[in-house]
Amino acid sequence: MTAKPRRFGRAALVGSAAGAVLLSFAVSANTAWAEGAIATAPPTTASTSTGGEGVEVQEVVVQVERDRAAAAAPSKASLDETQPESIISHNFLEQSRPETGDFTTTVLLAPSMAGIASNGGGVGETNKISLRGFSDGQFNITYDQISFGDTNNPTHHPASYFPSSTIGTAIVDRGPGSAGDLGQANYGGAVHLFSPIVSDTPSVSEKATYASFNTVESVSTFQTGAISQLAGTKILLNVDYRKSDGELSYSSGTAENYLFKSVTNLPANWLLTMFSAVNTTQFYQSDAGPGETWAQVMAYGKNYALNNNPATPQYYGYNNQHKNTDFEYIDLKGGLLGFDIDNQAYTYFYSNKTISPNAVAVVDTSATSGVLSPKNPSPPSYVTAADPATDIGGYNKGNRYRVEGDVLRFTKDLPFGTLKFGAWYEYNDTDRHNILYDLTDGNADLKYASVTTPPVAHTSNIKTLEYSSWSQYQLFVDFYWRPLENLTITPGFKYVDFTRTVDAPVENSGLGTFARGSLYGSNTYTKPLYFLTANYKIKPFWSVYAQYATGFLVPQLSDLVTATPSLNNDPPSLTTNYQVGTVFTKGHVTFDADYYYIVVTNLQVADPTNQYDINVGTANYSGYEGEMAYTFDDGFTLFANGSLNVAKDMTTNLAEDPSGGKELTGAPKATAALGALYNRGPWQGSFSYKMVGPQVAQYTAGGQALELPRYGTLDGSVSYDFGHLKLKLAVFNMLDDRAITNFSGTDAFFSPTSTGLYQFQAGRQVQATVQAKF
């Protein structure tokens, strides 16, 4: 089958989605206004249980923060929850998160969350987060209830979508949730992000930040309030611009984000929300990294990444990434025939244009001795006679996709409970390419000339020319049964159908019997999923809950890159979750704790080279989590949270662990946070310490575990509000702790000959912010 380029028509897609939603409204409204029509129910204003999908987040926050301690706590749970979760307040985010942060810095305070930036200044794609040891791509990330992620694997690009100014609040769900929690990876949990609230009153805010590493940011926010000429429509506009030299050498970048959100009350109690966010970013970062070898650390220090020497692969001009994204949705809520209805049509787009060398694990001795170190001391076979061994081999990589989808939800209140059901459909088109170049002279690097018979000039430097797509749907139903006033039992069912297709004129994997050539393959994955939760309120301020739930993760796209894709029966990875917990919120105190035990089958983990995933069989995740806060009468709030986490591959029985099991890489054994907040009159302040425990980074070829020690960050901020003017000073990583946070490789630690790459926690950062409000 011959692949054909897809067309990406954002305007056409958004227009068709808008037309479909407005047509749906027109039919509903005409029915409601017809003489003798049945009465319509108002939109749902409170969720049956908290969570990230299909809820009114404002109402959830109001319910959770009805007690004094919960209102002041930076992270807390809901008395209605049926799985462990942390609701992170808008006030805490406004006061304590880095102004130049992204969605990863929003949720790091929560228990079992790990991941700290390795480049100060808030530019580049160095930030990654994990949840209970599940890595990015093994849990959902949603924005205003819409799950988003890459199309080869549901991983994420924090610098490419939502800067911190576009996030109003966040919920971390540590579990698959209910059947109505939708996404490709309701497997290890979910991080739910919500856009800022559109205000009823007009306002203008201009915020300017200057920070370490020559970082500047401006955030302009406009709220129109209700516009009578537009039937009371309220509009929010937000413009975020930032640039930074970065803490890492020659790793500067810029980013712009434009956000539009409007809310319109339509006749017959219908509500229309329209949203658009457009983001562009350009930065210098190696696609072959990030990170530096131990020899580079010894030669240049922990801030080394790139240089200005064109004779080396670390030259910043050879390590350039330019990304564009957009994210839009139209949401229509209302009542019809006794049902609350919520229809959300959406689309998002990602484009990545990258120039990168093949490797960065080479020391440039010119910085110390003035002698250039060749990139290719032993010329690889694809360097032609016309290309000197000292030339820099690299590639031009492109990745572009458009995703569109629709979520339709129905809610029906009954005398003995609430029924929720609906469907989700999603489709995407993706094209990727990887073209090899001699970066020194700009000519094609003819790596594949020897395997192409006869030699074909226009393909002999093409590593990958690939088109792919998926179409998926999920059907779900949850019933919130209330046999007693203080007891809610919720059975749920979801059916997943996911078809992935690859159509590549040129594909290269180097795996198995397939090395290079054209490829067409398609696989369909189906799975029924089951859920059962219960919440019992011992007292109005004290509840207990339990959850049984199954999770699902589709194999990544590279699983189809085999000689015969149809014979690749690698099954989806599945989780079975057992969780119990309790929540107490009364007066000055809020507290919650839980225990979880998760069985994973067909666990997919990255191979030591990080080129593809391998199925390691069965794994177990278990642990304890808790958080609490106590608020005083004078405006002070003390808080603490923590977790003890175990993540093991149960197919391996190591001699040092007679009980069986091999610790999974990238899974911290514990997390902890503690601190204090102050909020009284015009003064606000925060002081917090977040610790991420030790974790296995990699295993050597001989099976030895390479373990990273714990690391942490001490952060603080203080602000004073004059009314129309607010001043804020924040310091992150006050102790300038430069601990190792990641290691990729299988060599021994700290070896001068190792090709493994190290990343370090970003150093101390100081941010000063001035905000004018009218």
Image (tube, rainbow, N blue to C red):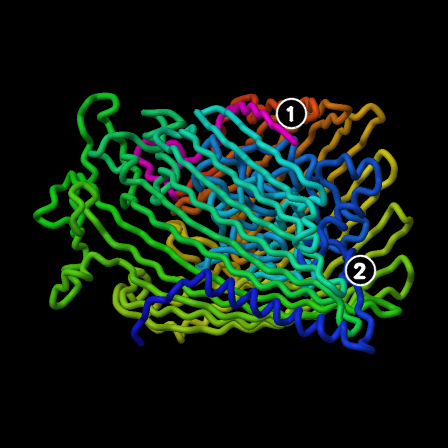
- Taking the view exactly as shown, the residue that stands out farthest to the bottom is 36
Dot 2 amino acid type: Ala
CA–CA distance in space, label 1 to label 2: 45 Å
Q: Which mark is residue 109?
A: none
Q: Position of residue 622 (x, y in %)?
A: 65, 50
Where is 641 relative to 151, above or below? above
* Residue 315 left/right relative to 55: left
Q: How crowded is the residue under tag 2: few (<14 C-alpha within 10 Å), some, or many (20+)? A: many
Q: Secondary structure at mark 1?
A: strand
Instruction: Answer yes or no: is residue 16 visible.
Output: yes
Q: Position of residue 523 (x, y in %)?
A: 45, 73
Question: What residue is shown with label 1?
Answer: 726
Q: Looking at the image, is mark 1 or mark 2 nearer the viewer?
A: 1
Give the number of callouts: 2
- Taking the view exactly as shown, the residue that stands out farthest to the front is 229
- Give the camera-side residue of 617 and 407: 407
Q: How crowded is the residue under tag 1: few (<14 C-alpha within 10 Å), some, or many (20+)? A: some
Q: Position of residue 369 (x, y in %)?
A: 21, 21
**Which of the 4 image quadrants contains residue 38?**
bottom right
* Residue 465 left/right relative to 535: left
Please give the name of the residue rendered at 54% of the width and 52% of the height, measured from the top-left corner: 276
Dot 1 amino acid type: Lys
* Residue 231 left/right relative to 185: right
Instruction: Answer yes or no: is residue 624 visible.
Output: no
* Residue 686 left/right relative to 417: left
- Give the camera-side residue of 151 and 10: 10
Please give the name of the residue rendered at 74% of the width and 75% of the height, measured from the top-left corner: 31
Verify whether residue 767 appears in magenta: yes
Q: Which residues are magenta?
A: 745-774
Question: What residue is shown with label 2?
Answer: 534
